[in-house]
Image: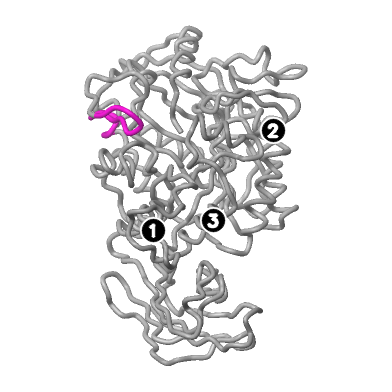
């Protein structure tokens, strides 16, 4: 979450440390490089194309009086989250980043008084969130929205939004993720992505014992970023916990750069399913009359930042966006990892620009909006780098759908798969589908969903309708398998009217036959695209 009033002051300090050079008529400020570490060569990791929105809180999974009836939780009003995810898929986007505070390091009283109660974690809320994501078939990025959870006993860190200082948070942070998220949900839903820290702080707020990795804990003279050496081991500890202790080698993990403009930490992942993450905003207080230009052209090919003279405008916003996307392509080649930007927004920061069009959590201006559209266009053209825009959470003050209600509706986001590849949808009728996650559906050996999402006693002894959106259908032969859980074995469930459609309703596969499904009998369908 970008509330960066404090870091606007940091840039003033940084600017005073940089020397001036001249190139091509623009004033470029030379900079020191970040790290001389060599990135180990490994095969580039592949990842799905991820496009969507970010900032829905875990508490938005709660049923909300006045909303339409839920399509997921029988007898309840729909949550705002259900409406938000439905809107996402209606625009053929496939990713949502859901945020919450780490309850092991952030007490409920602090969360409720500094953020809102909607940010507070409960197991029930997480269960509902995953069920809603499963229903819509989207990728779900889960993010503990804490800046300081990485610190061990050698450090203390001040959380900028929840206003407390913490030391030795790492053991509590790892324990929360292992026992409340990654271990319980390891086999529940394949499209979970784990982002364990938000914008990890490493400068200014950090105190070190006995000394900091870089002398005097000063901001290194290459921009607002911090040294990733601080967060490198905590992220490695998280990856090791997930891959070795939990034994999960299938879910993607997210590793973020150091404090806003710093470089990425170097980590190893035996499963090669780590995504790099960075957040992008065009902010009036820090990107004008100069913006930061990022590259790996420092000594020995190291990371550096140049300040480019360019006064706040649409053209400068678009140039900044072009550099951001070019930098990320270079970072992917350097680290051999795919990037997902879990925040890109039109928020112009605490200082209002001359072309401001709105204030508050969904502030934007003509120039900052043009930045968002340009970086969306640039990243989409790569067919590789993903992004989620900030924010469609209802806490923003604009109701359900958040910033989509003002600047978000003005941004064109290419649908996932392109206009030539309409989404695939599975519909079916299931008899006695009444136990929570009683039936497991896989497509081409990949977990699709488990039906129903929760206990549904109203489905006992009758047929109920189910829909699974955004099927990852492959060209050629596809295999769809239904498997019954090893409980409620006294009743043979039945599946009929199985149909797969493409786009607006083109039928790809249809089987009206009622087929038995039990603890000892599965159902297999094959179809060709």
At a point 57% along the width and 45% down the height, the residue shown is: 121
Q: Which residue is mark 2?
A: 169
Question: Label 1, label 3: how many angstroms apart (C-alpha)?
Answer: 22 Å
**SS at badge 2:** loop
N-term-proximal mark, 1 vs 2: 1
Total labels: the figure holds 3
Bounds of the magenta span?
Answer: 358-370
Q: Which residue is mark 1?
A: 78
Question: Label 1, label 2: how many angstroms apart (C-alpha)?
Answer: 36 Å
Q: Is residue 165 left or right of residue 481?
A: right
Across and down, in percent, residue 359 comes to: 29, 27
At a point 59% along the width and 64% down the height, the residue shown is: 188
At a point 42% along the width and 79% down the height, the residue shown is: 464
Q: Residue furthest right?
A: 210
Q: Is residue 368 magenta?
A: yes
Across and down, in percent, residue 270 comes to: 68, 52
Q: Is residue 388 left or right of residue 205?
A: left
**SS at badge 3:** strand
At a point 54% along the width and 28% down the height, the residue shown is: 162
Across and down, in percent, residue 91 comes to: 30, 56
Question: Label 2, label 3: how many angstroms apart (C-alpha)?
Answer: 24 Å
Q: Which residue is mark 3?
A: 192
Q: Quadrant for residue 471, please give it.
A: bottom left
Residue 479 in sight from this viewpoint: no
Residue situated in front as seen by the camera: 87 or 311: 87
Q: Is residue 44 magenta?
A: no
Across and down, in percent, residue 171 comes to: 73, 38
Around disc 2, counting alpha carbons within 10 Å, would you say few (fewer than 14), some (14 to 19), or many (20 or more)?
Answer: some
């Amino acid at each position: 979450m970008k509330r960066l009033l404090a870091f606007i002051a940091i840039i003033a300090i940084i600017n005073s440390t940089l020397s001036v050079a001249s190139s091509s008529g623009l004033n470029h400020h030379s900079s020191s490089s970040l790290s001389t570490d060599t990135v180990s060569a490994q095969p580039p990791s592949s990842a799905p194309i991820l496009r969507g929105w970010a900032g829905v809180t875990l508490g938005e999974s709660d049923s909300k009086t006045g909303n339409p009836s839920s399509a997921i939780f029988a007898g309840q009003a729909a949550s705002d989250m259900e409406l938000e995810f439905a809107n996402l898929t209606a625009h053929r986007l496939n990713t949502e980043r859901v945020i919450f505070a780490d309850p092991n390091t952030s007490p409920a009283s602090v969360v409720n008084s500094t953020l809102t109660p909607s940010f507070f974690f409960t197991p029930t809320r997480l269960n509902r969130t995953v069920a809603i994501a499963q229903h819509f078939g989207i990728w779900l990025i889960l993010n503990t929205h804490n800046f300081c959870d990485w610190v061990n006993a050698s450090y203390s860190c001040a959380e900028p939004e929840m206003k407390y200082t913490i030391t030795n948070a790492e053991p509590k942070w790892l324990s929360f993720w292992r026992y409340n998220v990654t271990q319980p949900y390891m086999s529940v839903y394949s499209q979970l992505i784990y982002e364990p820290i938000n914008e990890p702080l490493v400068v200014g707020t950090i105190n070190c014992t006995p000394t900091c990795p870089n002398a005097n804990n000063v901001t290194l003279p290459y921009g607002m970023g911090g040294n990733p050496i601080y967060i490198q081991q905590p992220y490695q500890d998280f990856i090791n916990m997930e891959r070795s202790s939990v034994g999960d080698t299938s879910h993607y993990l997210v590793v973020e750069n150091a404090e806003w403009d710093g470089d990425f930490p170097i980590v190893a992942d035996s499963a090669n399913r780590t995504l790099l993450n960075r957040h992008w905003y065009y902010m009036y207080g820090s990107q004008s009359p100069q913006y930061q230009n990022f590259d790996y052209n420092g000594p020995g090919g190291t990371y550096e930042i140049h300040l480019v003279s360019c006064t706040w405008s649409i053209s400068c916003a678009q140039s900044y966006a072009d550099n951001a996307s070019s930098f990320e392509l270079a970072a992917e080649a350097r680290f051999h990892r795919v990037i997902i930007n879990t925040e890109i927004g039109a928020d112009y920061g605490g200082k209002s620009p001359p072309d401001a069009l709105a204030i508050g959590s969904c502030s934007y201006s003509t120039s900052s909006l043009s930045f968002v559209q340009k970086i969306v266009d640039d990243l989409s053209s790569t067919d590789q780098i993903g992004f989620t825009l900030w924010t469609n959470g209802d806490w923003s003050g604009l109701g359900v759908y958040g910033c989509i209600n003002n600047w978000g509706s003005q941004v064109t986001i290419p649908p996932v798969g392109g206009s030539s590849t309409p989404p695939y949808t599975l519909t079916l009728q299931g008899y006695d589908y009444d136990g929570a996650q009683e039936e497991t559906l896989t497509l081409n050996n990949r977990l699709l969903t488990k039906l129903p999402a929760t206990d549904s006693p109203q489905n006992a002894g009758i047929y109920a309708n189910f829909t699974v959106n955004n099927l990852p259908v492959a060209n050629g032969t596809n295999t769809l398998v239904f498997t019954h859980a090893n409980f409620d074995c006294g009743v043979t469930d039945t599946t009929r009217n199985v149909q797969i459609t493409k786009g607006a309703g083109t039928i790809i596969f249809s089987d009206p036959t009622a087929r038995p499904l039990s603890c000892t009998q599965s159902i297999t369908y094959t179809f060709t695209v």
